[in-house]
Image (cartoon, helix red, strand yellow):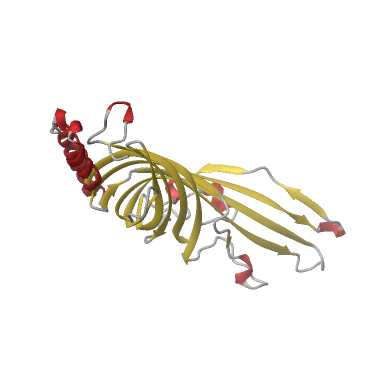
Amino acid sequence: MKNIYLLIFCLLVSSAVFGQRGTRKGSFNQSGRSANAFLHKQWWLGFKAGPNLSKPVVENRYQVISPTNYDENEVLKDYEQFRSIGSQVSFEVTFFFRRFSLSFQPTYRTSVFVYTNDYVWQDANVAGNRLELHYNQKQKVAWLDLPLMAKYEFDVGRVIPYVQGGVYSSTLLDATKEVMVSGVDFGSGGEHEFETEAVIVGATDLFAKYHWGAVFGAGVYYPLGNVRLTFDVAYRMGMSNISSTNNRYGSDRLSGVGDSLDDLKLDNLSVSVGCLFPLRFLGSGFKSMID
């Protein structure tokens, strides 16, 4: 799928360049026909960026420690949803024809998600002699997304709303994991609260090299001369496992603190702002042809 997206990207860019070279120099003076062409068929090139929030969807659960004297469900990971902020930056190439667009949007995306779990160690011989542990585990993962999107624009006025949908494939670039351990020690009849220093490790091997999903959303364009300012909201729905099934227990440091990744799909909600530039009929000083 990655090679297919790369081929599509090359074809889009090459078509846009040759299309721009083929535009007649005098076409700017033909206001009626040029404005019509500007509205009905156009290449757009630009960028956008913004924050995102993630939601892990658990497929199968795994753990290093299994309790013997209390319910196993009490040590299962508790995932935060849409709480930790990541970010994304996208480059966009779009071909527009009569309200419909085909858009390729390579994206550098970092996603952050957190889960917690708790353990209790109880002395079988001394009542009240126990140790309570709380684990806070933060994952920050960077991907290169390759989305292929279809858009439809609504002609309702100067501000142009649109809806979009498509598919994406993602390549893993980097991942880190931060584990914080805190708790209460009730040993010797006392009560001592503590918190350890964070364990931060590279976690690239714990995640799958590739995953894919569906994406859909909506947004608006605001024309500023021939340039479009953009605002959009997109929801990525993960369709495959982001965890590495081969390296689940591959980190000695993480296994030592009782951690192993579940099988996860990752949903992501993003907000982006940016701008798009037309590759055809762009006049000097970005003067609008359609005002």
**Residue 127 position (above or below residue 162):** below
Whether residue 58 appears in this view of the structure is yes
Closer to us: 284 or 117: 284
Q: Residue at x 48, y 64 (%)?
A: 58
Q: Position of residue 22 (x, y in %)?
A: 13, 33
Front residue of 226 and 170? 226
Q: Judge by depth and name the residue closer to the eye, 92 or 267.
A: 92
Residue drawn at 26 percent across, 48 percent down: 2
The residue under the point 50% across, 58% down is: 55
Q: Is residue 226 above or below residue 257?
A: above
Front position in the image: 32 or 118: 32
Q: Position of residue 217 (x, y in %)?
A: 40, 57
Tell me residue 43's x, y (percent).
24, 41
Rendered location of residue 211, percent (x, y):
35, 54
Left or right of 257 on screen, residue 123: right
Q: For residue 10, say whether it is visible.
A: no
Residue at 60% x, 70% y: name it.
Answer: 72
Determine which quarter of the picture holds residue 290. top left
| Quadrant placement of the C terminus | top left
